[in-house]
Amino acid sequence: MPLVMREVARRELSYGWGFLIFKDPPDSVTTVFELSERMGIGRRPFIITVGDIVSRNFNVYGYTNVAIIDGRTRRGLKLEGLESEAEYACRNTPGTISPECYEAVAQAIKTTPPNGRSVVFVEGEEDLLSLVALRECLANKSWVIYGHWRGFLCAIPCILRYRKIAQVLLETGFEEK
């Protein structure tokens, strides 16, 4: 059964999380890698991107280990040249997290090697899968990165605090239907 977002989660998720980066690429991408090094996560962390534009920018100006995309952008840009060793596909309706997509994201993160690349193709909406990525990410070794609808980049280090917030939101901000 899918997890359906409650109003409390909608309110909580309307704010940016982690480091809010108000720069255009390539500076936004470079900033994430600099922050990673300064935080002790390393210069080459495991990168999980959520969204087509963010995945495209990290692919062009850096790299992404796991890209979660739906093939649609508000700007009409195409995501090209995103090579991967593994691909996953799932369906996810807006405002929900389907079991199929939860599993696809978890598997992609679990099985992609540090220098590998995987893509999760979502038929529907991928936005809420950032919570799954944050819940399942490699602690102290990775980042979950997505573009906020207000135009800035959210870069969340995969540390215990953010993983716990994601877990609590998944448990209290959603209901099985």
Image: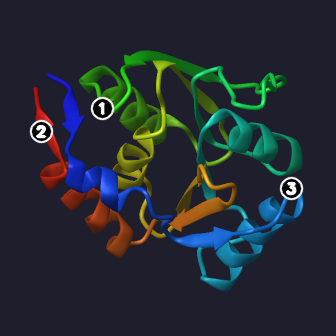
Cα distance between the residues tagged 3 and 2 = 37 Å
What residue is pinned by disc 1? 97
What residue is pinned by disc 3? 25
Q: Nearer the viewer, residue 32 or 70?
A: 70
Q: Is residue 57 left or right of residue 131?
A: right
- Label 3 or label 2, whichever comes before in sequence order: 3
Mark 2 nearby-residue class (10 Å; few <14, some 14–19, many ≥20): some
Q: Quadrant of the N terminus?
A: top left
Q: Nearer the viewer, residue 130 or 159?
A: 130
Q: Quadrant of residue 57?
A: top right
Q: Is residue 13 above or below residue 121?
A: below
Q: Which amino acid does the dot numbered 3 rest on?
A: Pro
Q: Quadrant of the C terminus?
A: top left
Residue 65: image x %, image y %?
64, 42
Mark 1 nearby-residue class (10 Å; few <14, some 14–19, many ≥20): many
Q: Which amino acid does the dot numbered 2 rest on?
A: Glu
Residue 125: image x %, image y %?
47, 26
The number of callouts visible is: 3
Residue 9: image x %, image y %?
27, 53
Residue at the (19%, 44%) spot, across then down: 6
Residue at the (62%, 52%) spot, across then down: 47
Residue at the (34%, 72%) spot, across then down: 160
Q: Secondary structure at mark 3?
A: loop
The reply to whether discs 3 and 2 touch (Cβ–Cβ < 8 Å) is no
Q: Is residue 66 left or right of residue 2?
A: right
- Label 3 or label 1, whichever comes before in sequence order: 3
Cα distance between the residues tagged 3 and 1 = 29 Å
- Label 2 or label 1, whichever comes before in sequence order: 1
What residue is pinned by disc 2? 175
